[in-house]
Image (tube, rainbow, N blue to C red):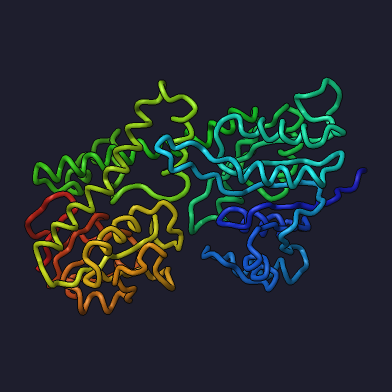
Amino acid sequence: MQRDTKPHVCVIGLGYIGLPTAAIIARADCPVTGIDVSERVVETINRGEIHIEEVDLDGLVRGVVQRGMLRASTQVAPADVFVIAVPTPFEKDGQHTPDTSYVMAAATEVAGVLKQGDCIILESTSPVGTTGAMRDLIAGLRPDLKLPGKTEETPDIAIAYCPERVLPGRILEELTHNDRSIGGITPRCARKALAFYKRFVRGACVTTDAKSAEMTKLVENAYRDVNIAFANELSIISDAMGLDVWEVIRLANRHPRVNILQPGPGVGGHCIAVDPWFIIHGAPDASPLIRTGREVNDAKMHHVVARAEAFVAENPGVPAACLGLAFKANIDDFRESPARFVAATLARKHGERIKIVEPYAAELPREFEGTGAELVDLDYALENCGILVVLVDHDVFKAVPFEERARALVYDTRGIWPDIGAPPRAAGLRLAG
C-alpha cells in the first residue's frame, strides 16, 4: 500500500483569502510557505499574529506557526503545490480593463522554481482565459518542461483554476465546507488539483475545464450584483414616490416566489463590485443587463451622497455622524466600499462637521486627510451628533435603542432601525423624534 506523502504547499498572496487558505492547508498537516511582498505582513505572520480581521483566524494562525507548519517569506520557495491568491483589480481607465499583472508576476516567480510533478492552482478571481495565459507564460519561461495542452506527451506540470466562495466573517468555515469548482487545463490537471483540495475541503469538489471554472466565479457575483441592483433601483423609485422601500419589499416578499434583496448605499468589496466588469470586458456587446446592474449600483452611491448632503445642508451647524466605512457588516474590509465613498465625499464638502464611526478602524483611510473629519466612537456620536447617516449595518449599530437616537435626524440607508417610523417616510430617509 502506497504511503500518503503530504505535499509541501506554497501560497502566494497572504491577504483576505491567501492567509486563511494557507492556515487551513497547514492545519491539514501539509507544510506551507506563505509568500507576500510586504515584509511587515511576513514578520507579523512569523510571530504567529495576523494583519487582517477574521473570526477565529488569529488562533488558527498562531497554532500552525507554533507547530512549524506555516512560515512566511517574501521569496517564492520550491514546493509541490503552488496556490496563487493575489489581487486582480481593474484599471480606472473608464473601460474597467482587468489587471492580471499580479497573477502573471506570481506565475513568473513560480516558474523559476518549478520541477517535474508540481501543481499550480490559480485561485484569484480572473477574466476568462487567465489560467491559459498563465500556462503560456510559464511555457515560454520554462521550455525544458512539458506543459499541459502544449504537448501530446504526459505533461510535467499540472495547472488548474479553483476560485474561493467565501463570506467575510465566515471564511474559515466556508473554505472548508463550501463546494468548489476545479477547472483544469486538461482533465488530468483537474484530477490532480482535486486530490489536493480533498485534503482540506469537506464540500463537494466538482471538476471541469479552466475557462468554465473562471466564468462560474464571475457569473456567481454578477448574478448577485444584478439582484442587488433591482433592490437599489427600487429604493430610488420609492424615494421619488415618497414610499418606504423597506415596507414595499417586506410586503412584496410575502409572495411565495419573490425574494427581493435589501437595498443599501451601493455595492462594495473586491468581488461583487469588480467581477461583473470582467464579464463585460470579455463580451461588451453581449452583456447589457450585467452592465446596467453595475451602473445602477454605482449610481446608488451618488444618490445617497446627494440625499445626505441635502440633509446636512438643511441643518447648518449640526454635526453629522457617518456610521460605518466597511463594505459590509462586521468586517474590517473597506475595499470598493460605497460607505467609504459616501463618508469621504461628505467629509470633503462639510469638513469638521462630519464625524466617522467605524468600530473596525483604528484610523481613517488616507482620503480623509486634510478634511477635518474625525474618527469617533459610537457613544460620542450618539451624544454629540444631531444627524446620523447609517451606511453599514454593523451589529453594534443595530443594537442602539430608540431612546439613544430619538432626538437625532436619521438617514438610514440600511433599514436597521425600522422603529423610526416618523415622516418623511421616503426610501431610506427617516426622521426620528
Question: Which of the two residues, 333 or 419, is positioned nearer the viewer here?
Answer: 333
**Residue 38, percent across and down?**
63, 62
Q: Residue at x 9, y 42 (%)?
A: 241
Q: Is residue 6 left or right of residue 321?
A: right
Q: Residue at x 59, y 50 (%)?
A: 175
Residue 160 visible from this viewpoint: yes
Q: Residue at x 48, y 34 (%)?
A: 278
Q: Is residue 110 left or right of residue 267?
A: right
**Residue 160, percent across and down?**
69, 36
Tell me where residue 225 sits by quadrant: top left
**Residue 328, percent across and down?**
39, 56
Residue 151 vs 310, above or below: the answer is above
Q: Quadrant for the C terminus, please.
A: bottom left
Residue 364 vs 196, above or below: the answer is below
Residue 259 visible from this viewpoint: no
Q: Quadrant for the N terminus, please.
A: top right
**Residue 87, percent across and down?**
56, 48
